[in-house]
Image (cartoon, helix red, strand yellow):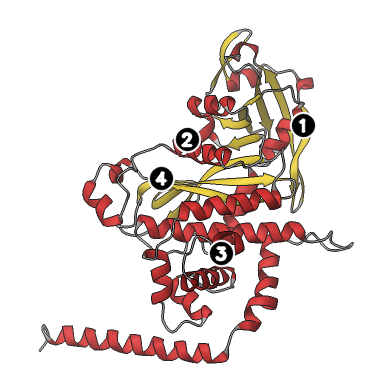
């Protein structure tokens, strides 16, 4: 907590934010201001709600501090920035950014909220570092909904690739060490993003659709047409990284695109991945300021799985998608503190010594369990649980009394 505590000017919010992050790290059945306040030993949830909704602090500056912390702990010149969005299913229409839209998490169109995340993946570890909430046009063009959700006036509509560009530019400005960027088709299909990355001299491996048209020596061709014309010897079996059940082996081929040269010079390729079981193909547009071998591009493409691991750890263990906040500021503050908790776990995991024979390396999830059992839980008091039982029952009694009084006006 030391890197971010300076953003909280008074001792009360500094103590509260420390307790809040400890609650995120705890194995609570659900995570919200009520359960976190109870875990912290507070008398009621008001303090935690105030921290998220009303206290004076800047979530963007806290994320900048987290980014600097990640640079110090996990920084590596060959690191990869991974961009992707995740969706949180929601009911109703009042939570900021919610509408019926496609969610990759659900795999279909659902009533949900989408956010673009940036993950930092280096040989030392990987963690979430920044986020941008996607605000659909149904929200950005509706002054009443914007006002009710507290959306700042300067925030307008931006596509997901545009949000990704802003996140990457903030990372570059903040001095985050990296060399490569990777992402899925939503970002690979945006030429403006690719141009911006070449301007920063970042190599990239961005997924594209099979219909993507690429310049070749024989003219403009679809990606799947290029793949169909490759000879058998063009394919090489290479691992995209280690998985829980073994190496992630695929057949790979890449085609140099000499006609794609532009003012940034460098080297362009079309990278093709073939599933060994069903023959399904995936395509990537790649660029690097320097020549690199095929296995290097494959390694970068494989890094895209790190953001899925980060999403899973942040949702199942840290409550990323369990917030109960409808407004812009509260959503960003909750997400920022989840990012801070995840960065702590990633950095602490990187410090662990190599595991002895017969044990896998300690994971983020396992470290979270140990940290809670050995550090957080022993510091809690039995009296806190009793105090919260009394508070909960008093609150429920007041609610029950109110319901009965309201019913008395309408029922005989």
Q: Which residue is mark 3?
A: 318
The residue at 58%/32% (across/down) is 207
**CA distance separating discs 1 and 3:** 34 Å
Asked if labels 2 and 3 touch by Cβ distance under 8 angstroms, the answer is: no
Residue 285 position by quadrant: top right
Secondary structure at badge 1 equals helix
Q: Which residue is mark 4?
A: 134
Give coordinates of residue 346: x percent, y percent.
Answer: 67, 57
Asked if labels 4 and 2 touch by Cβ distance under 8 angstroms, the answer is: no
Q: Residues within 10 Å of mark 1 (few under 14, many from 20)?
A: some
Left or right: 109 as drawn, with respect to 243: left
Instruction: Please tell me which residue lies in front, 236 or 374.
Output: 374
Between disc 3 and disc 4, whose residue precedes?
4
Q: Which residue is mark 1?
A: 295
Q: Which residue is mark 2?
A: 161
**CA distance separating discs 2 and 1:** 27 Å
Q: Residues within 10 Å of mark 2 (few under 14, many from 20)?
A: many
Between disc 3 and disc 2, whose residue precedes?
2
Nearer mark to the viewer, of 4 and 1 = 4
Nearer mark to the viewer, of 2 and 1 = 2
User: As displayed, is residue 309 above or below residue 34?
Assistant: above
Left or right: 5 as drawn, with respect to 139: right
User: As displayed, is residue 352 above or below residue 408?
Assistant: above
**Picture quarter with the N terminus:** bottom right
**CA distance separating discs 3 and 4:** 21 Å
**CA distance separating discs 2 and 4:** 10 Å
**CA distance separating discs 3 and 2:** 26 Å
Secondary structure at badge 2 equals helix
**CA distance separating discs 4 and 1:** 34 Å
């Amino acid at each position: 907590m030391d890197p971010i505590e300076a953003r909280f000017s008074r001792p009360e919010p500094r103590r509260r934010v420390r307790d809040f992050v400890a609650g995120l790290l705890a194995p609570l059945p659900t995570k919200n201001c009520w359960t976190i306040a109870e875990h912290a030993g507070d008398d009621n949830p008001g303090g935690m709600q105030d921290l998220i909704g009303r206290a004076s602090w800047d979530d963007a500056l806290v994320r900048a501090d987290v980014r600097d912390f990640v640079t110090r702990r996990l920084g590596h010149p060959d690191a990869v920035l991974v961009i992707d969005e995740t969706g949180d299913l929601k009911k109703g229409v009042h939570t900021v950014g919610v509408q019926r839209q496609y969610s990759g998490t659900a795999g279909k169109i659902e009533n949900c909220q989408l956010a673009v995340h940036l993950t930092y993946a280096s040989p030392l570890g990987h963690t979430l570092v920044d986020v941008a909430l996607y605000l659909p046009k149904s929200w950005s063009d509706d002054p009443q909904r914007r006002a009710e959700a507290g959306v700042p006036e300067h925030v307008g509509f931006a596509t997901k690739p545009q949000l990704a560009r802003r996140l990457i530019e903030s990372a570059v400005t903040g001095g985050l060490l990296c060399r490569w960027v990777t992402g899925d088709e939503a970002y690979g299909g945006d030429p403006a993003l690719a141009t911006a990355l070449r301007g920063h001299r970042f190599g990239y491996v961005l997924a594209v659709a099979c219909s993507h048209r690429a310049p070749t020596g024989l003219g403009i061709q679809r990606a799947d047409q290029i793949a169909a014309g490759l000879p058998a010897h063009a394919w090489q079996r290479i691992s995209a990284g280690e998985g829980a059940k073994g190496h992630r082996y695929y057949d790979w081929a890449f085609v140099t695109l000499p006609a794609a040269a532009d003012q940034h010079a460098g080297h362009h390729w079309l990278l093709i991945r073939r599933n060994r079981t069903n023959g399904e193909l995936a395509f990537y547009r790649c660029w690097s300021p320097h020549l690199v071998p095929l296995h290097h591009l494959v390694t970068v493409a494989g890094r895209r799985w790190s953001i899925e691991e980060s999403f899973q750890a942040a949702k199942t263990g840290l409550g990323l998608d369990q917030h109960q906040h409808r407004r812009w500021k509260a959503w960003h503050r909750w997400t920022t503190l989840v990012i801070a908790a995840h960065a702590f776990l990633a950095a602490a995991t990187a410090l662990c010594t190599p595991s002895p024979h017969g044990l896998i390396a300690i994971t983020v999830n396992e470290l979270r369990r140990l940290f809670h059992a050995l550090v957080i839980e022993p510091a809690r008091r039995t009296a806190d649980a009793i105090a919260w039982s009394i508070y909960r029952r008093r609150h429920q009694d007041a609610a029950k009394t109110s319901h009965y009084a309201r019913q008395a006006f309408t029922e005989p």
